[in-house]
Amino acid sequence: MRILHTMLRVGDLQRSIDFYTKVLGMKLLRTTDRPDQKYTLAFVGYGTNPEHAELELTYNYGVDKYDLGTAYGHIALQVEDAYKACDAVKAQGGSVTREAGPVKGGSTVIAFVQDPDGYKIEFIQRD
């Protein structure tokens, strides 16, 4: 078994595609519009299945905001330099919610950013 994708419900599909592609450097892999079912999907990622897991961005017609609840944590991305990654997010107008620095009680450098719908994304610095 392996993880194929993670689905996130988004309030503005193009805004989310722009964030994940222009700010985080992912590629738009494919889209599917289902007008009869009233939703559109966009898959983004750094590569495609089966080599890479993808994010499925789901836009349900007419829904522009979701309550994220308290169960959702974050998505983690490996980055070469968390400090530079945060600077790049800020330069694109993105939100950094925890600046890059060592994790409490350890030496791993991490940071957190937030996508336009409020989903948290952790940067973990690794060579």
Image: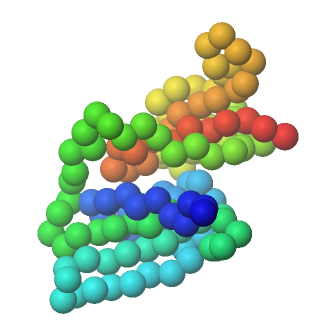
In the picture, measured across the screen, residue 4 lies left or right of residue 68, that is right
Residue 101 to residue 37: above or below? above
Taking the view exactly as shown, the residue that stands out farthest to the front is 1
- Is 86 situated left or right of 44 in this image? right
Q: Quadrant of the C terminus?
A: top right
Residue occupying the point 30% across, 64% down: 12
Residue 40, relative to residue 90: is it above or below? Answer: below
Residue 81 appears at what percent x and percent y? 75, 37
Task: Tell me, yes or no, if residue 88 can be seen here.
Answer: no
* 78 up-or-down from 56: above or below: above
Q: Position of residue 52 (x, y in %)?
A: 66, 65
Q: Which image quadrant for residue 90? A: top right
Residues 67 and 115: in front is 67
Viewer can see residue 107: yes
Residue 124 in picture, x, y percent from top left = 67, 36
Depth check: 27 or 23 in front? 27
